[in-house]
Image: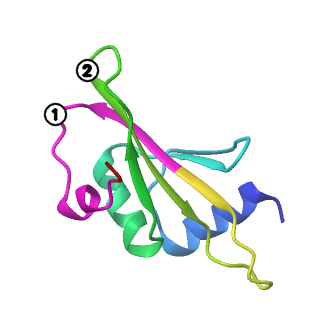
Amino acid sequence: MSDESAARVTIDFLRLPYLAVRPGPESVLVTVDEPNDLAAWLKELPGEVRVSAPQPGGVALWSLLTFTMPDGDGARVPLTVSTVAPLDTPVLDEVAAAVAW
């Protein structure tokens, strides 16, 4: 099974929100609509949230670094689940608590 297929199986099985899925150089890249969508992901697939430095236009990139569910052999695929949002976007406590400042 490809890494992208493993990501899609995890997303479908756990019913996680997403907009797009594509392979990346070091992980499968998943796009979500807004930072609070990361809460559903964190509930099922713990990881670390990183927030970029402010970008032009007053936005930041929010990224959750996590892994798929293990396959039958125990292998897991790295995932980067990301969204871009205005700097003043309110976020749920569980998302804010997972940010690695």
Residue at 33% from the left image edge and 43% from the top image edge: 34
Left or right: where does residue 92 sit relative to residue 41? left
Near-viewer residue (25 or 19): 25
Q: Is residue 72 magenta?
A: no
Local secondary structure at mark 1: loop
Near-viewer residue (101 or 3): 101
Q: Residue furthest front?
A: 101
Residue identifier under label 1: 88
Local secondary structure at mark 2: loop
Q: Which mark is residue 58?
A: 2
Residue at 60% from the left image edge and 69% from the top image edge: 10
Gap in angstroms between the C-alphas marked 2 and 1: 9 Å
Name the residue type under label 1.
Asp
Q: Give the vertical position of 85 relative to 73 (above or below).
A: above
Name the residue type under label 2.
Gly
Residue at 30% from the left image edge and 33% from the top image edge: 85
Q: Position of residue 23 (x, y in %)?
A: 72, 45
Q: Label 2 neighbourhood size at 10 Å, few (<14), some (14-19), many (20+)?
A: few
Count the marks. Answer: 2
Left or right: where does residue 15 sit relative to residue 21? left
Q: Position of residue 4 (x, y in %)?
A: 72, 55
Start and end of the magenta stretch? 81-99
Circles 2 and 1 in contact, beta carbons < 8 Å: yes
Residue at 34% from the left image edge and 14% from the top image edge: 56
Q: Quadrant of the N terminus?
A: bottom right
